[in-house]
Image: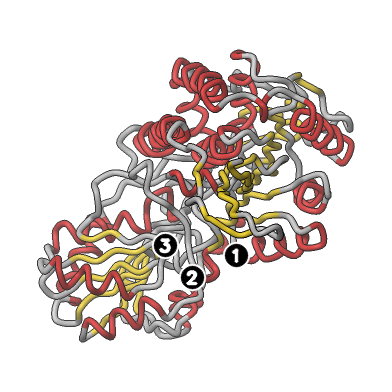
Amino acid sequence: MSLSVASDLYIGGEWVAPSSGQREAVINPATEEVIGMAPVGDRTDVEQAIACAREAFDKGPWPRMSMQERVAILGKMLGWLESNRGRIVDLIIREAGATAMLAEFMQYGVPMKHAATMLKDALLIQPKYAPAEVTPNFTGQKVLGTAITVHDPIGVVACITPYNFPYFLNIGKLYHALTMGNTAILKPSPFTPFEALIIGEAAQAVGLPKGVLNIVTGDVKTGELLTTDKRVDMVSFTGSDKVGSLIMAQGAPTLKKMHLELGGKSALIIRGDADLEKASMDAIAGFTIHAGQGCALTTRILVHNSIRKAFVERLGMMVGHMKVGNPADPTVQMGPLIRDAARKRSEMYTEIAMGEGATLVCGGKRPVGLDRGFYFEPTLFDNVTNNMRIAQEEVFGPIGAVIGFDSDDEAVQIANDSDFGLGGGIYSADAGTAYEMALQIRTGTLAINGGAGTMLSSTPFGGVKRSGIGREYGIDALLEFTQAKSISFHAG
């Protein structure tokens, strides 16, 4: 069954057929069925999108509106998207392969909550006055001077998003950029274009000024046109660290501002005094949510050796009872990987881990009876050492690696022994010790005993080391999409 979604590019406030006339099939990763034919943008389309975004920023009303005016329009967009909740959730299930619960609550519900909070946070941003200073001038008179700092939008922002949480990331990037007065060009993954194009429907429905939002699809070359063009002032990218480093290099000649949310190999530390029931629930989620296709997932499971055997037995039993299948079935707990190449990557890392001496506890192969779709069993390894590739490299598949430790210092050392630093967690009955450990771990976010129980909308999210540059969410993150400008003056 095909989807009822836009099938053209959204450029300059209008639906535009791709200049090449090319369209390609988008498939449901759970069934391999074609769900729609998506437009494929090329250089001509990107040129048009950049020109429209540039015109809208340089001459249009959007950056010159008050914050209240922009917030009102973007609030109406959220209202339109909420009125189309059912369509969007169905799209997330069928295009991204998310389970029904994941699609409803995390892939749709959380970004909508985050966007609404961003609009509220933005209204709190006000110009700031510097303390007045008295300074003698060349005539000997004393001048009383001060300055005000305002935050100008940066300009044209290229938002480049991956396939794993496409609607979530599309909304997040656009609401950061647009709220602060920038214009934007959204370039989604070729695997999940419709979760971007539907936002164009919302923009058109509420009368977002022409050129403020542009949506172009295409391959890697399409993205490279955005990251190298001097008319684009900033790139906000989510994806792998390897691609992120390439984008930095592409943007360097034109000195673009870079906002990068990249990969992860996050550690979940389970101390000997941890609540094993709660910790095991978190541990299994940490490598099976969305079939392990999440940058901040805790795929390294560090367990105190005094409880490791019992914990691995419990975790292996839980993994063995997980229902894997078509996410259209609400009882399914884990759906497919996005494409066959992703499944082959998980198969490759399974072979690598066994070759390096890790013990396969469960999983490691394609599920029996699921002949269509890109499924791979949730897979758990024990006896992993932190120098193994399964512990150091991002798989982006449903594979968890258990690593033993004997002391808190050793756990912190293992957690920090990584090129990445995005997420993490600690389970312990001693919250004070857990907090002291958290302060020593080099990562962007960390949850103690499950964290706040929700994804907080004003809490900064981002990573260190190869996990990225910059933060999302909260007032400081909104200001990353601006340039500070001081205007000085004196009395008399």
Disc 2 designates what residue? 420
Q: Is residue 260 left or right of residue 439?
A: right
Q: Position of residue 406 (x, y in %)?
A: 21, 86
Three-letter residue code for mark 2: Phe
Along the viewing direction, whichever of 294 and 336 lies nearer the viewer: 294
408 vs 297: above or below: below
19 vs 153: above or below: above
Secondary structure of the residue carrying tag 1 is helix
Q: Position of residue 53 (x, y in %)?
A: 76, 33
Disc 1 designates what residue? 241
- Comes first in the chain, label 1 or label 2: 1
Q: Is residue 248 left or right of residue 334?
A: right
- Comes first in the chain, label 1 or label 3: 1
Q: Are marks 1 and 2 in contact (CB under 8 Å)?
A: yes
Residue 312 appears in the picture as rendered: no
Residue at position x 20%, y 65% in the image: 427
Residue found farthest to the front: 140
112 vs 166: above or below: above
Q: Is residue 63 left or right of residue 310?
A: right
Along the viewing direction, whichever of 229 and 477 lies nearer the viewer: 477
Disc 3 designates what residue? 444
Cα distance, mark 1 to mark 2? 9 Å
Q: Position of residue 197 (x, y in %)?
A: 64, 28
In which quadrant will I find the N terminus? top right
Q: Dividing the picture into quarters, in which one does residue 437 lie?
A: bottom left
